[in-house]
Image: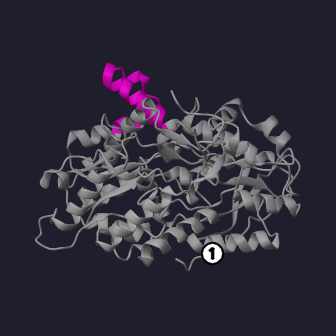
Amino acid sequence: MKVASRSKGKLGLAALALLQVLLSCDANSNGTVKPVASEEPTEGSEPLPIELSFVRMTEDDLILKLPGETLEDNRWTRLYEDELGIRIRYEWVSKGDLYDQKLGGALASGAIPDVVKVNAEQLRTLHNEGLIQELTEVYDQYASPFTKTILNQEGSAPFQRATIDGKLMAIPATGSSIEGAKYIWIRKDWLDRLELDPPRTMNDLLEISKAFTERDPDGNGRDDTYGIALTRSLLAPLMGISGLLAGYEAYPTMWLEDKDGQLVYGGIQPQMREALLVLQRLYKDGQIDPEFGFKNSVQEEKLIADGKIGLFYGEQWGSFLAQASRSKERDSDWQAYPIVSATSEPVRVPLPLGTYQYLAVRKDYPHPEALIKLLNLHLEKNWGETAEYEKYYSTPQPVWKLSPVTPYPALKNLEAFRQLEQFRSTGDRSVLKAEAKAIQKYIEIYEAGKENRDAGWGWKKTYGPDGAFSILEQYIRNDQLLYERFLDRRHRR
């Protein structure tokens, strides 16, 4: 998500610096996949598939839930081979931090796969070393009109970032800036138990955090709860601090325009100091898990699952994190609320550029169009006229992750919510397209109140009438969305 280049590495440095301020007041998997043997076709035989190699992180948790499918042999790899004659091969797969280390080594040595996903700095390095090829004509010729429409939903900025010396050197893995909008996810049952109102100001939020820490909201008679969830990844989309910082008009990682019309970097503006002092006080007062600086999201999520944390900042999909508490407390209830301001002015909701990764093609790979064909088919089978959403996107397992390329419409979730709202107001189910139709099915499972009702709980909390997307619509109506200054397109509707 990301005139300066902001890579994941820079985000990491920013997060580390913030973490030091607060605290001061699988590693065994690097399996190599064997390459597919290459054979020459015989006369009269079907042409052999084109091989296209990648490297990637593992998806062990997902694979365990999909019997009969692996990273190398699954519904997506079979579709690509059957429909396009493209056989996917992984030169290696690895977990988390080990993936980043191994990718860094591969880039440094020049031993890259046919297609490699990199950040902006890595892309420029590969270009300077002459290791990747230009894709301008390939993209123009092979990208379908539907693909071009989808990848342009974020405006021209992602493609500008992928263009070096006037040449398109990679296809941006376009994200969605508007999906970066933050909300406050709060345990509503704790609010009700302590007779507290939802927050309207930052002072209200701080009082709620204090009450969740000190007033025994779970009623077990022990001092064992915290107000706010944080992890060592302070700028993460869930359990991060960017939503809280925005309440003090502090916007780390973003380029903004100051009162004189000059571009300034948000991470070094004076508003950051006040916000960090507040976080420091929360930490010293025991309202934050004292071990958060050593915990990743999975470890901190356990505190939510155990009913020990009452609120966190996060994106619209925070409902599925909050749902962890319902495994032990079936009656636990969470609700999304708008982020709040420490001043009398309406809060501005920061939206960093949603694109920070790029798909580059190895210099001497003979079929660069293969990458574009994958993008075309992935978008078509999920959102096109022949879409099979519940087979290739959500079963409800996120099977889209099985694909080595995962483009998506930047506005797809907001559009699905708008279709659901239209259905709720008219009763006309025909207005629901594939994704909205699947979401409505999950919501109805929850509303039916049967044993498997929690399969739809998170969907209702995000896409329901008072879910997270209803708040996003409020942000849009009130002109509260704050885009990075260099973005050339705004999603105001």
Image check: 57 left or right of 329?
Answer: right
Please tell me whether mark 1 sits on a helix, a strand or a loop: loop
Identify the magenta region. Answer: 413-441
Q: Residue furthest bottom?
A: 28
Residue 240 seen from this side:
no
372 or 21, which is in the foreground? 21
* The quadrant where residue 369 appears: top right
- Looking at the image, is 77 positioned above or below residue 110? above
Q: Residue at x 20, y 43 (%)?
A: 449
What type is the residue that disc 1 sits on?
Answer: Gly
**Residue that carries the numbered disc 1 in the rendered image:** 31
Find out whether residue 418 is within the magenta segment.
yes
Find out whether residue 440 is within the magenta segment.
yes
Classed neighbour count for the residue bearing mark 1: other residues with Cα under 10 Å, few (<14), some (14–19), many (≥20): few
Q: How is the image coloured?
A: one colour
| Residue 150 placement (x, y as % from top left) | 63, 35
Q: Residue at x 32, y 56 (%)?
A: 322
| Residue 421 placement (x, y as % from top left) | 36, 28
